[in-house]
Image (cartoon, rainbow, N blue to C red):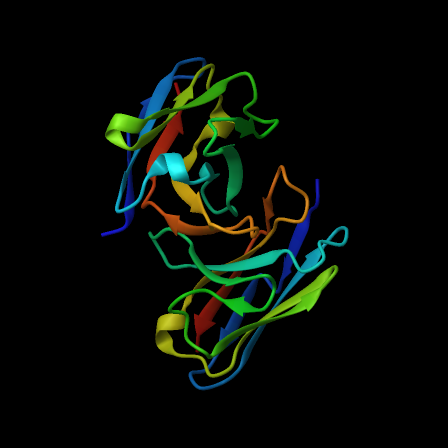
């Protein structure tokens, strides 16, 4: 089973600044990686799949990059509504799919 | 409206049973790969099971032999029968739909139902 490790655990960013979140896989997952946003009390929402493709309706300020074992989610200009926990998920090795432990993005 | 609505969660004693329901609107459960994903308090999501459109189901090792998924096509619903529950089964249980292509990620989630296992 592939283990997904996210860093940092918490990220505090001012509105308008860039937020960079990292996700590392214990073994290569190719480009088979997704990112989700989860706001307090809500279900996760798919942001990115295939490491870099935005899901339907996701704003362009969200972008994903990486392949193999190292991945990045970037929020180019943080807005207050982006305060949430972000999770990565690999699906190269099915079953199971596995999720990371999350990065909490706080607004300064 | 395309949505998933879970129900059936609650407090259950260790060793007990519970059945969760997930009713879909706006699309057919039978035409999609449907999953249960759970999330323990303060933790990341954990995949539990996936039912293919064929009806074949795969389970996480942590629930294999204890949990069973079924479908009711007439109600457009998915169920999770949880038996021999343990304290570490405590979580919010989400019903989720896999994307309709080769990407094994989830493009639609319900709001979840909380299961608490405690004596």
| Left or right: where A65 falls relative to A18 | right
Q: Residue furthest right?
A: A27
Q: Is residue B115 above or below residue A62?
A: above
Q: Residue furthest left?
A: B1
Comparing B31 with A4, the one in front is B31
Location of the C terminus of chain A by quadrant is bottom left
Location of the N terminus of chain A by quadrant is top right
Comparing A81 with A45, the one in front is A45
Q: Is residue A53 above or below residue B88?
A: below
In x, y percent, where is residue B41?
45, 42
Q: Is residue A17 above or below residue B109?
A: below
Residue at left offset 51%, top offset 32%: B49
How many numbered badges does the structure rendering display?
Answer: 0
In x, y percent, where is residue B95?
39, 39
Q: Is residue B23 above or below residue A69?
A: above
Q: Quadrant of residue B6?
A: top left
In x, y percent, where is residue B108?
38, 50
In x, y percent, where is residue B11?
32, 25
Q: Quadrant of residue B30?
A: top left
Residue at left offset 47%, top offset 79%: A61
| Left or right: where B82 falls relative to A87 | left
Q: Residue furthest bottom?
A: A16
């Amino acid at each position: 089973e592939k283990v997904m490790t996210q860093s940092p655990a918490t990220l505090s960013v001012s509105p308008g600044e860039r937020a960079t979140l990292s996700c590392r896989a214990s073994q290569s997952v190719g480009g088979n990686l997704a990112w989700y946003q989860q706001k307090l009390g809500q279900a996760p929402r798919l942001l990115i799949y295939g490491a870099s493709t935005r899901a339907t309706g996701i704003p362009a300020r969200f972008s994903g990059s990486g392949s193999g074992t190292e991945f990045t989610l970037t929020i180019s200009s943080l807005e207050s509504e982006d305060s949430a926990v972000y999770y990565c998920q690999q699906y190269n090795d099915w079953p199971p799919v596995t999720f990371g432990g999350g990065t909490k993005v706080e607004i300064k | 409206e395309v949505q998933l609505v879970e129900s059936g969660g609650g407090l259950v004693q260790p060793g007990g049973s519970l059945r969760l329901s997930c009713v879909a609107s706006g699309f057919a459960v039978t035409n999609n790969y449907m999953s249960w994903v759970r999330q323990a308090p303060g933790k990341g999501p954990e995949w539990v099971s996936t039912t293919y459109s064929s009806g074949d189901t795969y389970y996480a090792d942590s629930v294999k032999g204890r949990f069973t998924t079924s479908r009711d096509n007439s109600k457009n619903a998915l169920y999770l029968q949880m038996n021999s529950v343990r304290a570490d089964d405590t979580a919010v249980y989400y019903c989720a739909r896999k994307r309709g292509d080769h990407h094994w990620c989830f493009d639609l989630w319900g709001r979840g139902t909380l299961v608490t296992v405690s004596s």
